Image (spheres, rainbow, N blue to C red):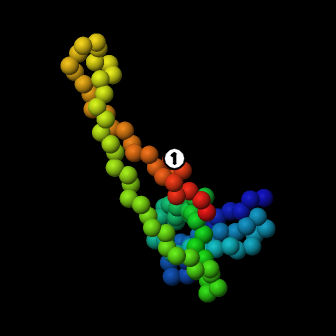
């Protein structure tokens, strides 16, 4: 059986969510939510984080790595095109063409 969420009363009012594994063992307890609706929204957020979130090792024996620089999003280059203008037509169209990402050109890839 898969794990599940339990909606429970918080000691000081409001609601909390408990995350239990398939055997019923407690895995996590949420913050206090003021309403059931807010608690259900918290479950949705927890599902999103669990499915896509990275793991940050903040333990005292964590391996320290230098911070990676984040590159600014590459600027788009304007390209002049006469596609669809017809033969001999002076009409031209400016199109936006994305600049290649580092991964696309093979630079900076590796690990």
The spot of residue 11 in percent (x, y) is 55, 81
Q: How many marks?
A: 1
Q: Quadrant of the N terminus?
A: bottom right
Secondary structure at badge 1 equals helix
Q: Is residue 7 left or right of residue 87?
A: right
The spot of residue 35 in percent (x, y) is 47, 67
Q: Nearer the viewer, residue 8 or 45?
A: 45
Residue 36 visible from this viewpoint? no
The spot of residue 73 in percent (x, y) is 38, 54
Q: Is residue 1 left or right of residue 52?
A: right
Disc 1 target residue = 104
Q: Residue at x 32, y 42 (%)?
A: 77
Residue 13 lies, with reference to residue 83, above or below; the image says below
Q: Residue at x 46, y 71 (%)?
A: 34
Quarter where residue 93 is shown: top left
Residue 47 lies, with reference to residue 27, above or below; the image says above
Residue at the extreme left of the image, as rendered: 90
């Amino acid at each position: 059986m898969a794990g599940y969420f339990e909606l429970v009363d918080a000691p000081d009012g409001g609601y909390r969510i408990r995350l239990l594994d398939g055997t019923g063992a407690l895995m996590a307890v949420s913050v206090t939510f003021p309403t059931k609706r807010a608690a259900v929204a918290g479950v949705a957020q927890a599902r999103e984080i669990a499915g896509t979130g990275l793991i940050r090792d903040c333990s005292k024996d964590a391996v320290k790595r230098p911070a990676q620089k984040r590159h600014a999003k590459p600027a788009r280059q304007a390209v002049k095109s006469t596609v669809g203008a017809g033969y001999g037509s002076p009409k031209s169209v400016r199109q936006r063409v994305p600049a290649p990402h580092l991964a696309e050109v093979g630079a900076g890839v590796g690990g």
